[in-house]
Image (spheres, rainbow, N blue to C red):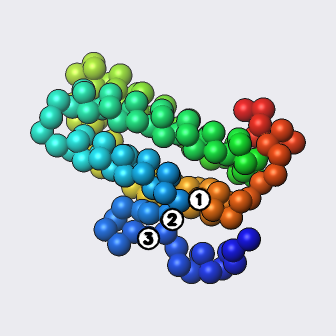
Amino acid sequence: MADPMEFAAAGPDASDGRIELGHAPMDAIHREFYDCMDALRGPDDRAESLLALHEHLLRHFAQEEHWMRETAFPACACHAREHEMALGVVSEVRRRHDAGDAEIVDRLAEELPQWFAVHASAMDAALAEYLRTGGGSSAAAHPCAAT
């Protein structure tokens, strides 16, 4: 396993504000998230962009949770709860937007990237390191396998 202090000192690459964690499949999913956020802040239909973001997050989080289950990632329950919370927020924003609250989308577009930066640099960075170093043994023997 890699030296955790070396990883902590290097940290995720975020030179342009977009975090790269050195795990190509996860980095690709994260780039899709940033594309969805760019679209949400753009001139296109907000309802359509919000739906696209929600669909992306469903796929994005399902993929990460699959990796966590398959490798018996120790922090899978905590990580999955963060995903559940974020999906709940996006669902509520969609509901309020559909009810006529256009300002709520502006708040999401401002705040979700801030949450994501913290989530990715902590939770996802730990998962990426775990995946890169071949962490985990049998998922069947781990409590996360049941979730």
- Residue at point 37% right, 46% down? 33
Q: Considering depth in this image, is 143 or 23 the residue closer to the camera?
A: 23
Q: Nearer the viewer, mark 2 or mark 3?
A: 2
Q: Considering depth in this image, is 22 or 37 the residue closer to the camera?
A: 22
Question: What quarter of the picture does the C terminus occupy?
Answer: top right
Mark sitting earlier along the chain (1/3): 3
- Residue at point 32% right, 31% down? 52
Q: Quadrant of residue 27?
A: bottom left
Q: In this figure, which residue is indicated by the disc labeled 1?
A: 128
Q: Is residue 137 left or right of residue 92?
A: right
In the rendering, which numbered label is found on residue 22?
Answer: 2
Mark sitting earlier along the chain (2/1): 2
Q: Can residue 2 be seen by looking at this rendering?
A: yes
Mark 1 → mark 3, Cα distance in angstroms:
13 Å
Kindly check if marks 2 and 1 are in contact, taking CB atoms under 8 A apart as contact. yes
Under mark 2, the amino acid is Gly
Task: Name the spot of residue 90 as percent of width and height, x first.
Answer: 41, 33
Task: Name the spot of residue 61 as percent of width and height, x first.
Answer: 53, 39
- Residue at point 48% right, 34% down? 59
